[in-house]
Amino acid sequence: MTFMTKTLGTVAALALSAGAALADPALIYDLGGKFDKSFNEAAYNGAERWAQETGGSYRDIEIQSEAQREQALRRFAEAGFNPIVTTGFAIADILGQVALDYPDTKFVNVDGFLPEVPDNVLLINFQEHQGSYLVGMLAAMASETDTVGFIGGMDIPLIRHFGCGYAQGAKAANPDIEIIANMTGTTPTAWNDPVKGSELAKAQISQGADVIYAAAGGTGIGVLQTAADEDILSIGVDSNQNYLHPGQVLTSMLKRVDVAVHDAMAAGTDLETGKYMTLGLAEEGVGYALDEHNEALITDEMKAAVDEARQQIIDGELNVVSYYENDSCPALNF
Amino acid sequence: MDLNTILQVLDSTVRLATPLLLACLAGLFSERSGIIDIGLEGKMLIAAFFSAAIAAMVSTAETWQLFGMELTWLKDLMPAVIWGMFAGILAALFLSGLHGLASITFRGNQLISGVALNFLASGITVLIAQVWFRQGGRTPSLISGGRFEEITLPLAETLRPVPLLGPIYADLISGHSILVYVGLLMVPLTWWVLFRTRYGLRLRAVGEAPEAVDTAGVSVTGLRYSSLVITGVLCGLAGAYLATGLQAGFVREMTAGRGYIALAALIFAKWRPWYALGACLLFGFLQAVALRYQNIDLGAFTVPVQFMDALPYVLTVVILAGFVGKAIPPRAGGEPYVKER
């Protein structure tokens, strides 16, 4: 009984209602927060689109600390939500354990890795290096100084994966290009330090970079701002960030987390689990953004070259080396 | 490494050191009066938010109304960025007041009160930002008029051709926002107030031996509150510089631990104003070098960037451990003053 009271107390604390309708989906955002203008916001947009299309409802939670991951997963599972969609690689480990306790609930994780995937878990990964390759080509073609920059957030393999694809794309478009790559830091504060992002951008600009790709969450906002202030081009990431500084953002590397979340929610309890799903260029899981804010920056020639490379990657004629393959990058030293 | 590169690194040093310096001097005032202030981070953060939020609102004053009142006159009175700065200072003062209330009036634990303020600031900024702007805990990007512009000092361009000194003047000394110069001026001012005025003597005394000050008939509580006011103003300036000087808006947790580095700098500086300038410039320089050179190749071995990032803390620990001189904090620091009866 005491355990029950405690459980109910936690439910209340999480502001979840235990009496929610059965089989509504639930969504757990990673630490960056729901409206990060990037990764988690894409997940939110996907869920909202699903809700609008079907008139269904879903629950979501922005966790505030590492410890809340397991708590949130268990509460949603106890309350009967299905499927439970989570974003960010960091929750994957605990999700793998929790999933075993709730075999009837389906779990989805975006970006995570598990050595063994439980039968009720679907892990969705994106071929970020392919999308980054395309924006790398665009960057190299737009650069007048033959120098492009890359600013990563926290120094983790995933972000190196982004940088590696970018460098290969830039080298493909212009073999003489110089690529300056920096990471913001090695702790989670590196995702939310726009001041440091600005300084890094200024340092890269002073070394000649005139297009900078920011794969750095909230830190990227500082990079894009400085690029606009100093009148050079920047490249956004995850969500379409072209509108933040119209005419100054060359393009954005799209990672369609929204599509993944939308499709998972739409499949509902019929979702196929127990496997990895990899979304690349062919599945339109990644790509580059072209809209009214940047159409003047992308010439027909650039577009033709990138679309050709895109088709070659889809057909398997062109192989973009993944950083994960042997933890190193052929085009860039980190 | 050519002159240009050195100047760019030093330029970046000045920008990175300024928020540290303002926060460090803020901490210096409060710790010299015997109030340990671990809440510098929170005060900077809340000041950063309110300065950006108010600057954003005032710079777009024509688009909204307050109780049916037109507000465009705000913009005519003062530039939006100045409104923002004052709002930031007020917000930091409010947190300072809370800290004083908890740790002076109610004699609570100063560390706990400071930590609580950090949490409060971290949560409330995002909450208010979301309610006001609906952009996920951010403020809208500030347009010109809502930001501190870089100031070009007189004759900067005329003197540029002068060898060595010309570029130093034009690139390094000129071309910062006003708050950088304010921050640098605060150093001699702090020194003068602390060591050359009666108020400063009392302030230092109240941090060492409050009972002596009390015996002399001077209010311990009053002195400590007054030092917290100065702390609030300086933290407000630091936050405003982050959000409206270096950046064009507020992002959640944008102080990213600078309040704690400022505390480390304060210990490193042994609670002295000129040393504080040196410590903050050193820490800023280390950051600037780490940002400019990812890994430094010294031939025989490579210095990884993580080492540069950790160096401020390592240096502080070395100083605290007493290897290089001794860092002795004000004696009454952390102790609520209880009048003997």
Image (spheres, coloured by chain):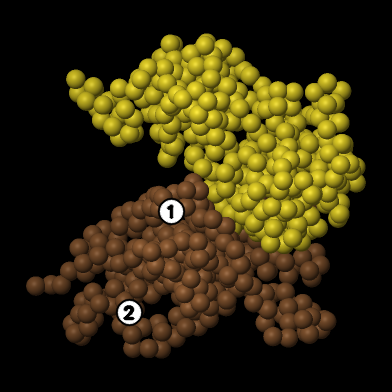
Chain colours: A yellow, B brown
* Mark 1 or mark 2, earlier in chain: 1
Q: Chain of mark 1?
A: B
The structure residue drawn at horizontal position 50% and vertical position 29%, both measured from the top left corner, is A52
Identify which amino acid the numbered label 1 is placed on: Trp
Q: Residue A83 placed where, x, y %?
A: 47, 19
In this rendering, is residue B79 above or below A72?
Answer: below
Can residue A149 be seen by looking at this rendering? Answer: no
The structure residue drawn at horizontal position 38% and vertical position 28%, both measured from the top left corner, is A71
**On-image quarter of the C terminus of chain A:** top right
The structure residue drawn at horizontal position 89% and vertical position 41%, both measured from the top left corner, is A301
Q: Residue B281 placed where, x, y %?
A: 59, 69
Which disc, if any, is residue A218?
none
Identify which amino acid the numbered label 2 is placed on: Leu
In this rendering, is residue B190 above or below B136?
Answer: below
Left or right: residue A159 compared with residue A166 = left
Residue B100 lies in quadrant: bottom left
Q: Chain of mark 2?
A: B
**Disc 2 target residue:** B203
Residue closest to the eye, B108 or A20: A20
Secondary structure under the numbered disc 1 in the rendered image? helix
Left or right: residue A153 compared with residue A311 = left
Left or right: residue B309 compared with residue A320 = left
Residue A62 lies in quadrant: top left
**Disc 1 target residue:** B132
Label 2, residues with CA under 10 Å away: few <14, some 14-19, many ≥20: many
Q: Residue B181 placed where, x, y %?
A: 57, 78
Q: Mark 2 and mark 1 in contact (Cβ < 8 Å)?
A: no
